[in-house]
Amino acid sequence: MTDTVQTEAVSGIEIFVPLNKLRKSPKNARKVPHGEAAIEALAASIQHKGLIQNLVVEPETKEDGTPTGYYLVTAGEGRRLAMLLRAKRKQIRKSEAVRCWLDTANDPSEISLDENVTRTPMHPADQFERFAELSNDKGWGAHEIGARFGVSASVVKQRLRLGAVSPKLLQVYREDGLTLDQLMAFAITEDHVRQEQVFENLHHNREPWIIRRDMTAANVPADDRRAVFVGSDAYVEAGGNIIRDLFSEDRGGFFEDAGLLDMLAIEKLREIAWTVQAEGWKWAEAHIDYPHAHGMRRFYPQTVALSEEDEARLEALSTEHDELAEGYSSYDQMAEDVAAKLEAVSDEIDVISAKRYAYDANVIVHGGVFVVLHHDGTVRIERGFVRLEDEALAVPQPEPEAEGDATAPEVGEDEQPEDGDGDVQEIEEDEEPGKPISDSLIRDLSAHRTLALRVALADQPGIALIALTHTLTAQLFYSYAEAGCLEVRPTVTPLGSHADGIEDTPLAARASEQHEAWAERMPRDVADLWSFIVGLPDEKRTALLAHCAARTVNALRLPWDRKPRSLQTTDRLARLLALDVAKDWTPTVDSYLGRVTKAHIVQAVSEGVSDDAARRIADMKKPDMAQTAEQLLTGSGWLPTVLRMPKAEEEQPAPVETEDLGSVEQPSEAEAPYTEAEDCEESFAVAAE
């Protein structure tokens, strides 16, 4: 074919014009140019299917009406640009003949406007279904389809997923009964039965996040600790399916089979447990959740001396570490080889330092280990538990003292021994110096000593601190051993029965780590505890006392246990500590919003977000209201009244000093004001609901 074209302005015929002889018409109605993505899509379509629709052109003329040899594109500028893109990519020649429709009878501006206005775009649902047909009928994958239509593979996957939605829901979408965002929420799975079931159960609130929540209610999110621990590859390899949300950030999808995930997690934990048991432990158990009700006594590792070789190596490593780190504040500032060497030195220091602590051989032989999952999916190994039947073996009993000669029983006043002749013999008082004194006298003397100790201890607060720390530590770290002389009984109230899941929270993990850090420093025998505490620096001893005192804090508000004075003290302690519960607690459906009335939910959103936000959710059903409120309150720092920082008390006048304290009339419990009664009653009512 030649590059020559017909030059006569004959309207209403099909002609072929070289691509480099086509120009954009100044009368084109589209002033906003085509986007790059649209041109790419047209180029891909033309490459695979050819030019489906002719360009409409008119001859270009000079001012005197003489033809220039070029043609102006009245309709089809996008197709012209797509052909130029193909020529730029060397897919066609610049002189490629383009099929055109010559029109000189109509107004070019009107034709351009008509092409862009007088048309009905395909409904998206029809598009989704046609894409699905291409995949199902022709076996084309996302990349093939994307290449033929000039869109990315990810876009094709989204359209294929939408095309796989239940035909019933697609029809509802066609009839404007669903928005595209709502349809995308249903497309998180391809289970038509589940999609239709969720649709039928929807209330008037059809927020996409609610639909996604209901669609995945029986699945496990990828950030669940079990999923993090097992991993997606192992789960899929075992036959599990991961549901992916192609339309929003799903943080790795949802694991469809919770039972399979639990089985894989337990199997992996058991493998770790077997490895740990090889250290010499009698048993090792694997659990997803920590078995808080195990009822066993726990022993902790004791401090042991390093060998001379290890001490020398540790000193050399410490010197090398300081030399390498000198002049740097972080690894990022170091050269790669220096950072790698410093990290290796640090690791070796940690390995040798770990040798300073070891479990008693008896505890290992007769004790065991729990291997469980942490809240973040990491493995938590808890060593040193001894079952009740093995305690006697794990803790050798002291050898009984050798018994001396039996002491002749004392003869009572009414008893008289008889000699061979039956004469009564007078019993002389035994004045042997080794004879023990009577129990009654011992009791009498010890009472005097106790009184003396009380007075002396009251005069020496520093020693009182030691004695109190010793008494609390002995009972809290040695299974309530009777080793202290102060009649102080610490009570540690378990919180698991009052708040489900609280013992598996990050805050509980911190408390456990604090306790274990102290436990590892304790002497093996409680008899050595006094010397240990006396030898601690003052600040360490105070820290230990603070830890023991903290373990006994009880701020529970229970309907059957009204204790206004204790709760008042709790508030004072919270103010003194500047307690901020919002750092570790957020209002969720499970923790609060699903367990209170609608009025409480509205009030929470009003206080934590805004009055307008509260009004928007006021007419919702309670389940939807709670879920929406959870989203709104995330990150707001809002707290229920029970968790807020209590208001400062009004200053009370200083008490009148008097020597006769007994003459000052004290208010009775009944007269004592309790300003928080209403707050407590409200919280009890909420808990009851």
Image: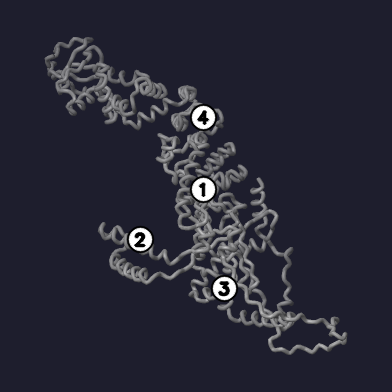
Q: Is mark 4 on a helix, strand or loop?
A: helix
Disc 4 marks which residue?
194
Real-space Cα distance between discs 2 and 3? 36 Å
Bin the neighbour count of mark 3 within 10 Å (Cα to Cα): few under 14, some 14-19, many 20 and up: few
Q: Where is residue 366 in the image (x, y as percent from the top left)?
A: 54, 59
Q: Can you see residue 511?
A: no
Disc 3 marks which residue?
527
Real-space Cα distance between discs 2 and 4? 52 Å
The answer to whether the residue labelled 4 contacts the one labelled 3, judged by CB atoms less than 8 Å apart, is no
Residue 288, numbered label: 1
Amino acid at dot 2: Asp
Q: Where is residue 185 in the image (x, y as percent from the top left)?
A: 46, 33
Amino acid at dot 1: Ile
Bin the neighbour count of mark 2 within 10 Å (Cα to Cα): few under 14, some 14-19, many 20 and up: few
* Vertical placement of residue 28 versus 306, above or below: above
Amino acid at dot 3: Ala
